[in-house]
Amino acid sequence: MDEKNVFIIGSNGIPANYGGFETFVENLTARKIDKNIKYHVACLSKSNNEFEYNESRCFNVKVPNIGAAKAEYYDLVALERTIKYIKKNNIKNATIYILGTGVGLFINIYVKRFHKLAAKVYVNPDGLEWKRDKWNAILKKFFKVCEKQMAKHADLLICDSINIEKYIKEEYKKYKPHTTFIAYGSELSKTNTINKLVNWCIEKNIKRNEYYLIVGRFVPENNYETMIKEFIKSNTKKDLVIITNVEKNKFYEELKEKTNFDKDKRIKFVGTVYDKELLTQIRTNAYAYIHGHEVGGTNPSLLEALSTTKLNLLLDVGFNREVAKAGAIYWNKEEGNLKNAINKIEKITEEEKEKYENLSKERIKEEYNWNKIITNYEEIF
């Protein structure tokens, strides 16, 4: 059988340190089943070198520090380099898989150019980028237009959430977008040692199984304000451990002013944790995980929580219900709702806790295991 070339554009590249797209590409390449597939991965870098990793050709793309346009510039250069490589090596029937919608304004031009080379263009539209609070009105409009153009011109949109696929089909039905659903993957994490955790807990003054946990990007649409306010009002004597890329920036100061979290000794911002084994231990030994993400598709940190943490309190939106189903407890943004949920699970029995844990892990095992995800992708490629 002929080798099938798949070019992946839009992630920061591999090896992955963090990030949803990066972790996805790491797993897609490392767990490859079909030996006839050859992956070519664009990697954001300070050089233009090429290297081999996970049996994939990785090509570095050097990008100048040009502020907000950096991501789009990176993708466009990667696409140009891909066209050049396909021509030079006379590659037929390649697949270009673009992660995210940032290059949407130019997608029509690139689809035409790739079709002339007998290549197809697939796109992962990610979450609803234009809804994120961190963007100003102009950027929100830009991302909405990009999304529309991707839906209009891509050969296939691969959505990692059923709700995202449904939204794309309805929002852009006049373009009759060709879509499919393939979930994001996870695995049931096992960790045999807690040495790292013991040291970390001593350093942060935290006790195992005596803390609620939040892990996520430090942005308003992840509902930090609601989660912190409600936690403060709850009766729990446990800590709230927040693992995030916190910087004492404008959002941090606004949050402090609105919630007075600095006056509650239970609230602990502990920075980021990039050590995967340690993070798994932190998740496993949390009393419960609180998830406030409401924008985006299948969220990797939610999958990790369901595979490790016994109790999960999730914001009640379609994306989260689709993933966890009966394996989690849900809360909404009405005043007192999350507070009541916290007070309730303080009294939960071991039997009930076990029920939620079994249901959440079953969801990961059945629907979000990497083998299933990789097989689905390879069939499409």
Image: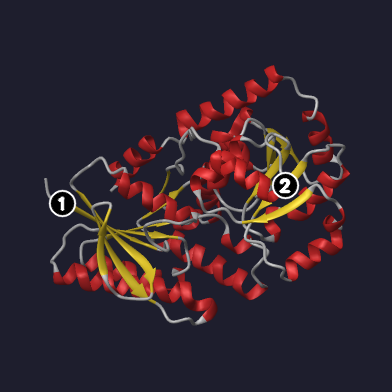
Q: Position of residue 84 (x, y in %)?
A: 22, 74
Q: Position of residue 48 (x, y in %)?
A: 30, 75
Which secondary structure lies at badge 2? loop
Q: Residue at x 60, y 40 (%)?
A: 283
Q: Nearer the viewer, mark 2 or mark 1?
A: 2
Between residues 39 and 237, which one lies in front from this camera angle? 237
Give the CA separation, mark 2 to mark 1: 54 Å
Q: In screen coordinates, is 1 left or right of 161?
A: left
Q: Residues within 10 Å of mark 2 (few under 14, many from 20)?
A: few
Type of amino acid under label 2: Asn
Q: Give the number of the disc on residue 205.
A: 2
Can residue 176 be seen in this snapshot? no
Q: Give the number of the disc on residue 3.
A: 1
Q: Are marks 2 and 1 in contact (CB under 8 Å)?
A: no
Which secondary structure lies at badge 1? loop
Q: In screen coordinates, is 305 left or right of 366?
A: right
Q: Position of residue 107 (x, y in %)?
A: 39, 69
Q: Quadrant of residue 130?
A: bottom right
Q: Give the number of the disc on residue 216.
A: none
Q: In screen coordinates, is 312 left or right of 229?
A: left
Which color scheme did the rendering employ for the protein?
Answer: secondary structure
Q: Position of residue 116 (x, y in %)?
A: 22, 68
Task: Decide: is 24 above or below 139.
Answer: above
Between residues 194 and 27, which one lies in front from this camera angle? 194
